[in-house]
Amino acid sequence: MINYNGKMVAQEDASLSIDNRGYHYGDSLFETLRVVHGKLMFWEDHYFRLMASMRILRMEIPMSFSPEFLEEEILSCVKENGFEEQSVRVKINIHRLPGGLYLPQQREIGYMISTSLLDTPFYINDESAYEVELYKDHYVASGLLSTLKTNNRIVNVLGSIYAEENDYENCLLLNEKKSVLEALNGNIFLVKGNSIKTPPLSDGCLNGIIRKNLIKIIGKLEDFDLKEESISPFELQKADELFVTNSIMGIQSITKYRKKSYDFATANNLRAKLNTQARLG
């Protein structure tokens, strides 16, 4: 079942208008989060990112869209699908209502909430082979819009096809300045000695929820120095570790980039702290 504008609809019966602006113009965004045994992981962070993104896109936020209202809408969808005692991936889609061409006739929005099961309630340690390569066919523009989870993800789609065709588990995206921006499905962190780097939002990387929480966690550690700085492709093969983060998988260690293989120790340590933060948050 899908929660479509507050009504539960069977997936096979759900449909969007042919005039849907998300389809025509990418005038839409989405939020993806974990729900574990009825608890929304990092919900406050997800909620405020969603609200901020809607404001940036000049969407009219309904008066009813309080954190409590949306939490209830999510949990009702989880319950309707019988997933109350399981680990669930939840996706919230927001689109501006039909009307107009590039200039919308209205600012009001519609929404859809969908769910799917996850294998584990925790972020797990996965040290299986995970090789990546740079995706250089197209670049992501630096700036504020690239930090949002809008439906304009064609570079990610093409990069994913490239990765599959060339037997890579993932690709790293570049911005127009040729700085390493992020992976296809999450933020990137680079470990070198006691220094951990991740690109700044000004480079155009996604304003990720796990990125935000890891920055807080690392900032409290005496053993590491966190830097939000641009990453050059030349730094990748000099790093001790590389890992990718997002709200569903948590932390995914990269094992190989070209001729360089990487360690997992820092990622494993941070994953344990992230799991603790998720339970407490």
Image (cartoon, rainbow, N blue to C red):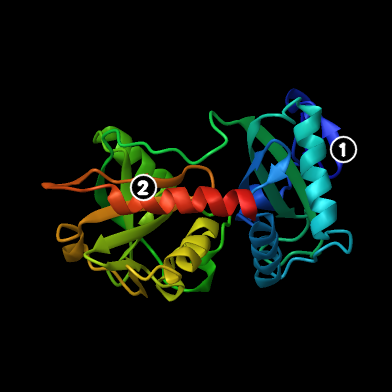
How many marks overall? 2
Front-lying residue, 213 or 29: 213
Foreground mark, 2 or 1, reads 2
At mark 1, the secondary structure is strand
In the image, residue 203 above or below residue 38: below
Percent of width and height locating residue 250: 47, 47
For residue 268, which numbered disc appears in the image?
2
Q: What's the CA distance linking mark 2 and mark 1?
A: 41 Å
Q: Residue at x 16, y 64 (%)?
A: 234
Q: Which mark is residue 177?
A: none
Question: Which amino acid type is marked by label 1?
Answer: Lys
Q: Residue furthest front?
A: 222
Residue, x 33% and y 68% (percent of image)?
A: 224
Q: Which residue is mark 1?
A: 7
Give me the residue at 68% from left, 54% from top.
43
Which amino acid type is shown beneath numbered disc 2?
A: Asn
Q: Residues within 10 Å of mark 1 (few under 14, many from 20)?
A: few
Q: Position of residue 67 (x, y in %)?
A: 79, 58
Q: Residue furthest left?
A: 259
Quadrant assignment for the C terminus = bottom right
